[in-house]
Image: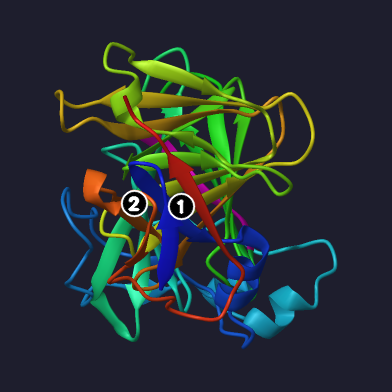
Amino acid sequence: MKLNLNSSRSILRPALGLALICFVPLAAFATTLWDLGVPAPTNGVPSDRSAWKAVPTELFAFEANPGKASSDPGYSGREYYFTGDAAVENQGLLAVFSKTRGTVSLYAKSGTDAKAARLIAEAVPLGIKQGGPMSRVSIVRNAGDEVVLEVTYASAGESAQFSFARNEIVELKPTGKLKSLRVLSALDYGVVPGFLGDDLIYDPAAFPESKTVAVPSENIFVGLQAGGDRMLVVTWPKGHQQIQLGLGGAEGKRRIESLDLQGDGQSFYLASLTAPGIWHRETMKAGFLEKDVTLDWKRPFPAKWKTQLSEYV
C-alpha cells in the first residue's frame, strides 16, 4: 500500500459500519449459561471445566415431576442458586462472573479452544464504593438464544444487568442505585469516529499530566488495543450518557486503562472486533516527506479503510 505522506504518524482503521458487517457472525449459535461449581480463578481464563454444569433453560427440570410442574400456569419454576461462580458462553465470547473480585471478565474466543481465549475487558461497579464483591448473581432470562444476568453488589442497592445473545455484543446496564460501570481495558488509542470528517483520536501521550479525559457524547467510542489486531467498540443510545477515559502509565508508556460509563438509566453495548492488522500505526520519518512510501501493512479484508495523519511537535 502506498501513501503520500507529509505528517509524522498515520493511523489506519476500517470504516466502522463495514467492519461490523464483516465481523458479526451470520450463523446462529447457542448461548450457554454455566454454573462453574467452584469460584472462578483470580487470574486468567478458567481452564479446568470438570465441575462446570450447564444451567437448564427450563428450571422445571429440577422438580420431582417436571411435567406436572410445567403444566401449572401459576408456577414458573424455582429460582436457581449457583453453587459456584457463573459464566456465559457462545461461539465467540466467554464471560466469567467472579463474586469475590466483583468483576465480569470478557474473553474473546479463538475457534473451539476456550483456553486460547484472550481477555478483552473487565466490568466493575463505579458507585459509592468503587469495585467491591458481588453478593448475588441471579437469572433474569436463560432462553438458549439470550442470557440475562443481574448482579447485586455488596454495596446496598447497587446492581447491574448483563445481557448476552448469540454474537459478541454484550449489553451492560447499571440498575438500582448504581449509576456507572467501569470497564477495565488497556488501549493504545481512543477514537470517536467521524463519519463525515476526521476521527477524534485520543493519544494518552498527549495528556502526560491527566488522569481522566472526558469524551464527547457521540454515541460511539472505539478503543484500539495493543498489537493492531483488536478493537473494543462501545455504543449507546441517544441520551445523557457520558464516557470518561482513565489514563495511566509512565512517560513513554502512557495508555488508556479504563472507561467510566455513566448510564443515565440506559444501556451501553460493548463488542470486540478481532483480525490481524485490523488497525495500524506508522511513524513517518523526515525522509518520507513528499514521497510515496510503501507500508508493510496490508488490508486484512475488503472494507472501506480510513487513514488519518497527525503531526506531533
State left or right for residue 76 relative to residue 296: right
Q: Which residue does the numbered mark 1 point to in the structure image?
A: 232
Q: Tell me where residue 4 appears, x and y as whole percent.
A: 44, 58
Where residue 198 sits, quadrant-wise, is top right
Left/right placement of residue 99 relative to residue 25 reads: left
Circle 1: element type: strand
Residue 133 visible within the image? no
Please tell me which residue is depicted at 35% across the width and 85% down the height of the picture: 111
Task: Name the mark on residue 283.
Answer: none
Q: Does the magenta stretch include residue 150?
A: no
Magenta stretch, main secondary structure, is: strand
Residue 11 in view here: yes
Specify the segment rendered in magenta.
134-141
Q: Where, by quadrant of the figure, is residue 18 drawn?
A: bottom right
Quarter of the rendering containing residue 229: bottom left
Please name the residue that numbered disc 2 is placed on. Answer: 225
Q: How far apart are marks 2 and 1 (CA)?
A: 7 Å
The image shows residue 60 at horizontal and vertical percentages of: 62, 73
